[in-house]
Image (spheres, grey):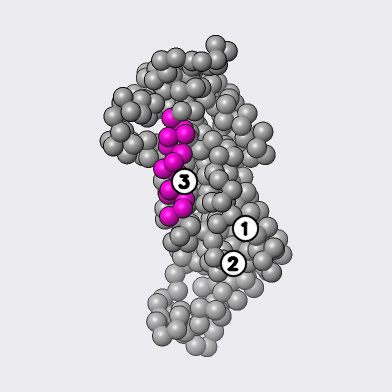
Amino acid sequence: MPETVVYTRNHGSPYSKGLMAQSLSASGLSPERAYELAQLLERRLDEQVGRRIDVDDLRELAEKVLGEQEGEEALKRFRDWRRVDRLDRPLIVMLAGTTGVGKSTLATMLAHRLGITRVIATDVIRQVLRAFFSKELLPAVHYSSFEAGEAVELVVDEAADRDLVGFIRQAESVGTGISAIVDRACQETTAMVLEGVHLIPGTLSEGLRRRCIPVEAVLAVPDEQVHRGHLLVRGGERPAERYLSRFDQIRKLQGYLVERARAEGVAVIENQSVDQALPEMMDLVLEAVGRLSSSTR
């Protein structure tokens, strides 16, 4: 049976269940359910007399199938998400979390679900800073986040925690790079997922926030034994022993991020399982898109 060809202006390409499923999953559907609907849509296309369809007509048919199968709420979320492509500002997702909470895995899965191709870890920014600035000039960036207290020679406030002082200094240095990356994304109107411990809630400037669709969350693992378990499965270049020896510092940074999140009204997502955490992140993104879509109608 010949394939249905989808036309955009004068260019045509075969209908793809995979691409349609990815588009539908951005409305919050599971990948499995989204693929089922993409298959149903393919059967609807096969029933048509012609073997070609305009991309706008395909989108209209997809909305009809989604509404019939999943209801008005799913349809509204899909339409809100489609409007992101026509907005003059990019979606910027910022997923904070300390070592071993699963933020890299969640960020990658979220980006795939949303069709975002740019995922940046803040530790990469720290590594770049290490290459350009000496240990004497920027000592904090030459340590891991949970070891940054070693860069603090003198704590002015005796009540201050050396580990947190070192981490905050490191985060401030990395924050300059984060702001530059977000600024570039805003100039290019390019959606992006940022993940890392340095994304302290509430520190992105108001000027940058107005130029994008910011979505912030802190990923946490409240149960200490579960958190230890995450660290134990690490291997290769990141041996578990190093992290476990600094487990108290890692937990301390998590406590600080969670406290800041609550003070700033930023969501805290407990990563008991990625199957639970991913839908929660999707909800945050779609709520932000929905709010902006409503305000621009």
Asked whether residue 172 is drawn in magenta, I would say: yes
From the top left corner, tell me how far across and down residue 84 is, in percent. 56, 64
Tag 2: amino acid: Arg
Reading the image, the residue beneath label 3 is 179
Residue at (41%, 85%) from the top-left corner?
A: 10
Q: Which-is-in-front pick, marks 1 and 3?
A: 3
Residue at (45%, 56%) from the top-left corner?
A: 185
Tag 3: amino acid: Ser
Q: Main secondary structure of the magenta part?
A: helix
From the top left corner, tell me how far across and down residue 58 is, in percent. 54, 77
Reading the image, the residue beneath label 1 is 289
Reading the image, the residue beneath label 2 is 83
**Residue 159 image-quadrant placement:** top right
How dense is the environment of label 2, judged by Cα within 10 Å: few (below 14), some, or many (20 and up)?
some
Tags 1 and 2 in contact by the CB under 8 Å rule?
yes
How dense is the environment of label 1, judged by Cα within 10 Å: few (below 14), some, or many (20 and up)?
many
From the top left corner, tell me how far across and down residue 200 is, in percent. 54, 35
